[in-house]
Amino acid sequence: MTDRDRAASCQGPYGGEGDPGDCGDPARFEVARHRRTPLRVCPVHLGPSLLLADAVLWPPVVILIR
């Protein structure tokens, strides 16, 4: 898998560093985080990532990427 493919896949719901995550769906949203790279997630993991991922900004900043 290339970096380009990895960037396009869901990193949710937790977005752990170096953890490939279990979801292989394409990412549709980007969730901003404090002092970390944005978390790219699919629609299924958008809600859980807002509640459970590390360093998510509040109020959340969510950007549609596709």
Image: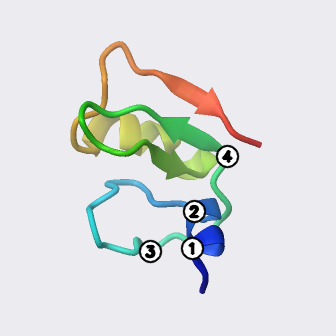
| Precedes in sequence: disc 1 or disc 3 | 1
Q: Position of residue 21 (x, y in %)?
A: 40, 71
Under tag 3, what secondary structure? loop
Identify residue type, mark 3: Asp
Residue kind at label 4, given as amino acid type: Arg
Query: Gap between marks 1 and 2, in whole Å?
Result: 6 Å
Q: Earlier in the sequence, mark 4 or mark 3?
A: 3
Determine which residue is flagged by label 2. 7
**Drawn side of residue 16 relative to residue 61, left or right:** left
- In the image, what residue occupies the spot 32% across and 54% down? 14
Q: Seen from this angle, which residue lies furthest top? A: 59
Residue 65 lies, in percent from the top left, at 69, 39
Query: What's the distance in space between the residues labelled 4 and 2, CA to CA?
Result: 11 Å
Check disc 4 and report the residue beneath it. Answer: 28
Indicate which label's residue lies in the foreground, 4 or 2.
2
Contact flag, marks 1 and 2 (Cβ < 8 Å)? yes
Q: Quickly name the residue at label 1.
A: 3
Q: Residues within 10 Å of mark 4 (few under 14, many from 20)?
A: some
Residue at mark 3: 22
Verify CB contact (< 8 Å) between mark 4 and mark 2.
no
